[in-house]
Image: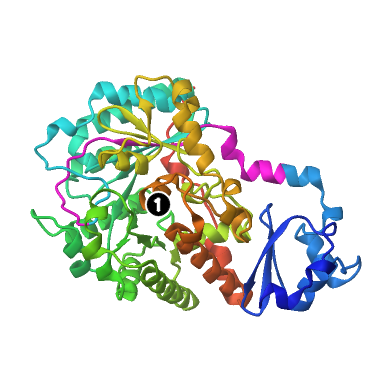
Amino acid sequence: MQLADVIQLSKVNADFAVPFNHRPIGERMLVTNDLGDHLFLTADEFRRFAYGQAAPGDDLYERLVAKNLVAAAIDVKSQAERWKKKKQYLFYGPTLHAFVLTHRCNHGCQYCHSSIVGMDRMDTDMSIETAERAVDLAFQSTSPGITIEFQGGEPLANWEVLQHVVEYARQKNQLAGKALSFSLVTNLSLMDDDKLDYLIDRKVQMCTSLDGPADLHNKVRIYKEGNSHELVIGWMKKINQRYVDMGLDPNLYRVEALPTVTKLALDRWQDIVDQYVDLNCRAVFLRKLDPFGFAARSYKTLGYTMDEFLTFYGHAVDYILDLNKKGVQVMERHAAIMMSKILADAEPNYLDLRTPGGACIGQIGYAPDGGVYSSDEGRMVGSMGDEMFRIGSVNDTYHQLMTNVHTRAIVTSGLNDGQPGCVTCVYKPWCGQQVEYNYKTQGSLHGRMGDSVWCKRHKYVFDYLMRRLERADEQELKIFERWTTNRMLEHFLQDRGA
């Protein structure tokens, strides 16, 4: 369906509709407004809508009003409150604080984004003094809730500082009273029973990497001291059992695992999904290779075109939906985030799909030397020798970090309204940008969405989901609605103090 085949521009009634964008999906036209409402219209309905020929009392008019597409029928006050609720992240500072405790790692993952070093490089560890200053900055965020995420390298290699951060932050929170949580991103190879006891006791959420079956995982996640896949699977099962023994809901409290899709995985979509299902995982987050760290250098051997990844993604999500129809409850995380925006009118606060993006105002990355970056990705760019995204250090004040020219430039570059390709896109109300990705792939903070692989990937996934919604039966709609359910992980919240 082409626009020129449907309407004559001279007949368009510009006063009838609110500002909207459109895109053909299947046999119908998808229409969205900036509030995040959407509606599928036939060619005739779209023509009547554009011409302003729908009248009160008829079915089309009522459907348009219900989706806030008729200008005269908008309740401005209620829609302003709705917008404020979805954009609440604009009213306070960064919630995610990524502490890179060390660059050391005992794995040699071929696609590593972090530019890691050998285990003997103790000089790359974050010191207790630097860690305390980083915690002090995190607590100055105006956000009512903060998450301190331990990153690396392998953060368990700097165990003393990890423990110190947890205890120091918990102590500060007795006065601050924030919704404080901790998250650990680990390959689990340095885990032992004593560490696990501590992490469970201190309610630290754990996340790891699992690239699929053993042959696939071990081929790209090189671990010379043992079997990486065996270690990961073993500790995942053990940690998950600990949660069960504590009486926590196993559908909610589990080790989060993430696969990174390499060239070797492109024809293994079913094997990867089956591996996660076999472990009773409830979500698979199919991640493309990023242009950071070692991944930028190994692209020739592990990389692929965006079209190849999107073919892989489509097959994988088709398979996941088929499993759901057979009673297996598993979701693709990226699709679930998008569906939460589309169907539940929610803002899951996924930093890569916000406008402005999550850099600086959604998250901050703290390097072992005390450098403060726009995000963990910004810190990765710094590890590659480019300090474009360094916004200061732990010796700066929070006000200096949040108001300097670097931060302002990064934040304004992540606005969809500043992008010619985004401002007219039907997916604008649900999409966003990552300025670090723009910079590494296109040499510009703003990027050029017309030839951006970031844009191509997200537009494909939105198209895929909209095609499914456009023809979805009752069973498939219920599956998607279930994917939008977002339950608070209250167990991982620390005590707020008196």
Residue drawn where x is 31% and y is 69% of the image = 272
Disc 1 target residue: 442
Residue 181: where, in percent of width, then height?
41, 37
The residue located at (53%, 53%) in the rendering is 486
Compared to residue 335, the image places residue 93 above or below, namely above
Q: Is residue 314 highlighted in magenta?
A: no
Decide: few, some or many residues near mark 1? Use Cα within 10 Å; few <14, some 14-19, many ≥20. Answer: some
Q: Is residue 3 left or right of residue 58?
A: left
Q: Is residue 302 left or right of residue 487?
A: left
Asked whether the viewer can see residue 42, the reply is no
Range shown magenta: 81-110
Q: How many marks?
A: 1
- Going 26% across and 21% down the picture, which residue do you hit? 129
Q: Nearer the viewer, residue 176 or 365?
A: 365
Q: Where is residue 387 in the image (x, y as percent from the top left)?
A: 32, 35
Q: Position of residue 457 (x, y in %)?
A: 45, 63
| Of the pair 62 and 455, the residue shown nearer to us | 455
Can you name the residue that lies furthest to the front here?
A: 10
The quadrant in which the N terminus is found is bottom right
Picture quarter containing residue 14?
bottom right
The residue drawn where x is 40% and y is 71% is: 307
Q: What residue type is labelled 1?
A: Gln
The answer to which quarter of the image holds residue 475 is bottom right
Q: In this view, does 32 lie above or below 348?
A: below
Q: Is mark 1 on a helix, strand or loop?
A: helix
Spot occupied by residue 209 in the image (x, y as percentages of width and height) = 28, 55
